[in-house]
């Protein structure tokens, strides 16, 4: 792994666990064992590093989510269960600590940095649109209630996942994320 990748990985972990403001460039340099000149060779600033961290998170998430969104073989409910499983897996790996790095950064920075807010908002809109497509499929195939508004349901389900991760993080228990989302799915069914 090169220095740039190492800096991105360590920054992602630090921003997700401690937050953007509480993480200094010196913290990242010490953990990465990289010189300041090497840091500034790759990144103009801490903000530039964080924006590239976001892009890296977006790309990894797209790689995981796209196969579910595009899979024509799975029923809508199965797609949503597998999507939920990706969020559960993330929380289990972190032992209910850290939560969603994007959710954490959105909560911390949306009101103070428009560049972060705009990039995160655009990605969240992609996620909602992907879930909306799944809900449309479920309605079309008769698996979900015909009176659903797929766009609103997509926002509800995505917001539920993000919010339930926060609750699980706060309580240090997986139950809210596991059971809460199952309940949300039940609301979609006929």
Image (cartoon, grey):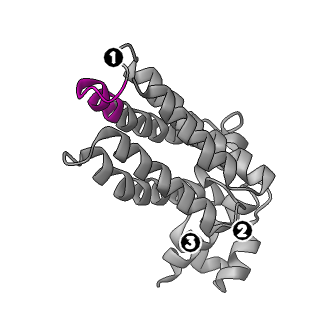
Q: Position of residue 188 (x, y in %)?
A: 44, 27
Secondary element at image label 3: helix
Query: Closer to the observer: label 1 or label 3?
Result: 1
Query: Closer to the observer: label 3 or label 2?
Result: 3
Judging by the rendered image, the residue that carries numbered circle 3 is: 9
- Single out the residue that lies furthest toward the left: 72
- Magenta highlight range: 133-144
What residue is shown at x 61% (from left), y 45% (from top)? 179
Secondary element at image label 1: loop
Contact check, label 2 and label 1, Cβ < 8 Å: no
Query: Could you tell which of marks 3 and 2 lies nearer the N-terminus?
Result: 3
Judging by the rendered image, the residue that carries numbered circle 2 is: 25
Please give left or right for residue 28 compared with residue 146 in the image.
right
Please give left or right for residue 42 compared with residue 35 in the image.
left
Q: Say the numbered circle drawn on residue 31.
A: none
What residue is shown at x 40% (from left), y 23% (from top)? 151
Query: Which picture quadrant has residue 160?
Result: top right
Magenta includes 23? no
Please give left or right for residue 21 compared with residue 55 in the image.
right
> Is there any visible trace of residue 40 in the rendered image?
yes
Asked if 12 appears above or below 136 in the picture, the reply is below
Query: Could you tell which of marks 2 and 1 lies nearer the N-terminus?
Result: 2
Judging by the rendered image, the residue that carries numbered circle 1 is: 146
Q: Position of residue 183 (x, y in %)?
A: 57, 35
């Amino acid at each position: 792994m090169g220095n740039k990748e190492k800096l991105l990985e360590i920054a992602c972990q630090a921003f997700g666990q401690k937050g953007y403001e509480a993480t200094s460039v010196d913290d990242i340099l010490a953990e990465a064992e990289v010189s300041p000149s090497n840091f500034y060779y790759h990144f103009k600033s801490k903000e530039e590093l964080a924006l590239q961290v976001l892009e890296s998170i977006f790309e990894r998430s797209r790689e995981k989510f796209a196969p579910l969104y595009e899979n024509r073989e799975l029923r809508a409910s199965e797609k949503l269960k597998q999507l939920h499983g990706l969020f559960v897996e993330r929380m289990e790996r972190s032992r209910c600590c850290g939560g969603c790095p994007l959710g954490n950064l959105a909560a911390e920075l949306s009101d103070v940095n428009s560049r972060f807010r705009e990039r995160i908002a655009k990605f969240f809109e992609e996620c909602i649109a992907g879930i909306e497509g799944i809900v449309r499929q479920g309605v079309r195939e008769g698996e979900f209630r015909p009176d659903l508004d797929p766009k609103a349901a997509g926002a509800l389900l995505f917001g539920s996942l993000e919010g339930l991760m926060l609750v699980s993080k706060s309580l240090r228990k997986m139950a809210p994320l596991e059971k809460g989302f199952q309940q949300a799915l039940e609301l979609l069914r006929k």
